[in-house]
Image (cartoon, rainbow, N blue to C red):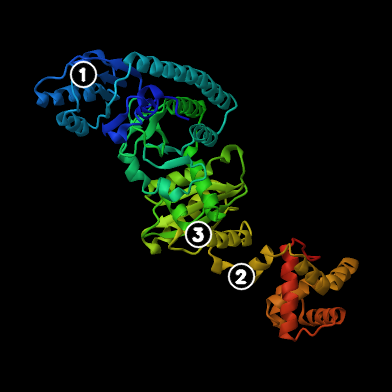
């Protein structure tokens, strides 16, 4: 992708190869960009340089006192010259050791030419390449601008903008907020763990500059992202080439991407944190991460601690979707943050809000779950259900915890007795059968056991099904069952006799009574009420 000429490129040109170039210092800086080539024999070349120039010299002006060569090199380094090429044969037969030492001290690339070359040929060749690269960069810049303008006009998501920036640069791109939390990232197929591991510490070591520029010990290319309140965060390109100079095309990409992101934030409420939480929650619950290390790195980069914490999956199931009740996850997240609870909160599906708690004290989960349940009832009404999965010590187990929380939430009938939250142990046989009520095998079983009673009641306006329900609910205690059914004992006994005759069963058998009770529970879970009830 690089659109600039480097010292390494210049040294490979035939016009320089003829001079038998040899690098004496600054080997690690050969990928520096060459903005221009400047031929000079002056002792104070810095007065005529602006930075990025590759200086060619025969060494003619060098002082007799070679100790003063350090001042010469300091001038080049301070002004930001790309490097220094010395042609031997005029002033020196060998580059002075003091000049080599000075260049090494300031990490300035120093190249000697053992044979003479025509400097005019070097400048013409290099300048032609530089101008061609600049022209190509201008053309490419127009294409980049068109791409991001199109994204902005169609209201592209921030994830699309970040993905496009990574695709165009060929390097991982991270969008972080001011707290150095990774909101979004596009790693181009790379694993999360080596890229975003210990992100907060590494990010804080790279200060934000006034414009798009490399920063920090890892040489990240960083662009500030703003909104109506000022600086919001940063868009960061992690270029593995570790070039000391910013790739001009990469700078263009980040500049245009930042404009698109800023426009998105200015257009209205930007729930980017919720989007980030939602994405990570879904990836955790659906086991999309490559490895536990990847999952841990991504969650920690978003601000969720894992080591030394107990993790709990919480699911909030509700029926209010859209309208004024949008962004309920935002309100829940703010409440948890206000009370100091570290968590990921996001809508995982319509009518479902997921919360992943990270608690330093495992025993603290119940008060937090109580608080979430109270908030859910206040915001969503009594039909909301809060379910908590078992705690785990590692993110690799959170998918199982989440699954148990979902099963628990699905088993609870909305409007159940006022409880703030439920756990898997709260699920009894009626709730379990309710979850399994769509299983055709259970449906056939219930119909097979109870059809004759249902048909009898439908034909005669009877209450045999109600009598059977009272009987099995009372665990076979006929006196208690008759009282609950509002019948005399004689009338109730007669109905039991009729039930036994129609079904061909013995109601005194505990096993048969249990089978009928299960059939009634399956029937009730499907919403079919008995006649007369």
Residue 406 in percent (x, y) is at 58, 58
Residue at left offset 30%, top offset 21%: 54
Q: Residue furthest left?
A: 65
- Residues under numbered marks 3 and 2 in contact, where contact means CB atoms less than 8 Å apart: no
Q: Quadrant of residue 173?
A: top left
Check disc 2: other Cα within 10 Å, few if <14, some if 14-19, many if 20+: few
Q: Quadrant of residue 442?
A: bottom right
Decide if residue 14 is on the left or right side of residue 484: left
Task: Tell me if residue 198 comes above or below residue 458 in the rendering.
Answer: above
Residue 343 at least partly seen: no
Residue position marked by numbered label 1 in the rendering: 90
Q: Separation of disc 3 and disc 2 at Cα? A: 23 Å
Residue 504 in percent (x, y) is at 85, 82
Q: In the image, which is nearer the foreground, mark 3 or mark 2? A: 3
Q: Earlier in the sequence, mark 1 or mark 2?
A: 1
Q: Separation of disc 1 and disc 3 at Cα? A: 73 Å
Residue 16 in percent (x, y) is at 35, 24
Residue position marked by numbered label 2 in the rendering: 428
Is 402 in front, or is 432? 402
Q: Could you say whether the residue bearing mark 1 is in a helix, strand or loop? A: loop
Q: In the image, which is nearer the foreground, mark 1 or mark 2? A: 1
Is 19 in front, or is 481? 19
Q: Earlier in the sequence, mark 3 or mark 2?
A: 3
Residue at left offset 71%, top offset 79%: 514
Check disc 3: other Cα within 10 Å, few if <14, some if 14-19, many if 20+: many
Which circle marks residue 76 in the picture?
none
Q: Separation of disc 1 and disc 2 at Cα? A: 97 Å
């Amino acid at each position: 992708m690089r659109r600039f000429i480097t010292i390494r490129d210049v040294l490979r040109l035939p016009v320089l190869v003829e001079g038998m170039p040899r690098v004496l210092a600054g080997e690690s800086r050969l990928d520096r960009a060459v903005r221009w080539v400047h031929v000079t024999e002056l002792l104070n070349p810095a007065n005529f340089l602006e930075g990025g120039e590759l200086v060619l010299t025969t060494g003619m002006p060098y002082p007799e006192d070679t100790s003063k060569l350090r001042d010469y090199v300091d001038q080049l380094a301070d002004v930001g010259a790309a490097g220094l090429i010395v042609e031997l044969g005029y002033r020196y037969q060998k580059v002075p050791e003091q000049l080599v030492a000075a260049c090494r001290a300031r990490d300035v690339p120093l190249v000697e030419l053992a044979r003479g070359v025509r400097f005019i040929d070097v400048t013409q060749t290099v300048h032609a390449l530089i101008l061609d690269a600049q022209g190509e960069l201008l053309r490419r810049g127009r294409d980049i601008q068109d791409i991001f303008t199109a994204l902005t006009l169609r209201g592209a998501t921030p994830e699309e903008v970040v993905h496009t920036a990574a695709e165009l640069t060929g390097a991982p791109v991270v969008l972080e907020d001011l707290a150095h939390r990774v909101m979004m990232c596009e790693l181009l197929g790379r694993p999360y763990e080596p890229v975003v591991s210990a992100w907060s510490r590494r990010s804080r070591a790279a200060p934000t500059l006034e414009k798009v520029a490399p920063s920090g010990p890892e040489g990240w290319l960083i662009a500030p992202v703003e909104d109506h309140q000022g600086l919001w965060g940063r868009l960061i390109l992690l270029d593995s080439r570790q070039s000391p100079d910013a790739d001009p095309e990469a700078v263009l990409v980040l500049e245009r991407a930042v404009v698109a992101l800023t426009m998105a934030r200015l257009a209205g409420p930007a729930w980017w944190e919720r989007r980030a939480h939602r994405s990570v929650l879904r990836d955790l619950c659906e086991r999309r991460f490559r490895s536990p290390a990847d999952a841990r790195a991504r969650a920690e980069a978003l601000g969720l601690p894992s080591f030394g914490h107990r993790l709990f999956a919480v699911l909030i199931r509700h029926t209010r979707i859209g309208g004024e009740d949008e962004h309920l996850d935002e309100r829940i997240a703010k409440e948890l943050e206000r009370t100091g609870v570290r968590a990921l909160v996001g809508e995982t599906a319509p009518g479902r809000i997921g919360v992943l708690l990270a608690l330093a004290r495992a025993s603290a989960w119940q008060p937090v779950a109580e608080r979430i349940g109270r908030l859910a009832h206040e915001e969503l009404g009594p039909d909301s259900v809060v379910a908590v999965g078992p705690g785990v010590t590692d993110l690799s187990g959170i998918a199982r915890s989440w699954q148990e929380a979902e099963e628990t939430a699905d088993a609870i009938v909305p409007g159940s007795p006022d409880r703030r939250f439920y756990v898997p142990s709260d699920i009894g046989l009626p709730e379990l059968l309710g979850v399994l009520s769509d299983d055709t095998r259970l449906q056939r079983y219930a119909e097979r056991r109870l059809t004759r009673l249902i048909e009898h009641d439908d034909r005669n306006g009877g209450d045999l099904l109600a009598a059977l329900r009272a009987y099995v609910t009372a665990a076979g205690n006929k006196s208690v069952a008759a009282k609950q059914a509002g019948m005399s004992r004689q009338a109730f006994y007669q109905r039991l006799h009729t039930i036994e005759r129609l079904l061909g069963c013995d109601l005194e058998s505990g096993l048969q009574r249990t089978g009928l009770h299960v059939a009634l529970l399956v029937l009730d879970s499907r919403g079919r009420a008995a006649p007369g009830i």
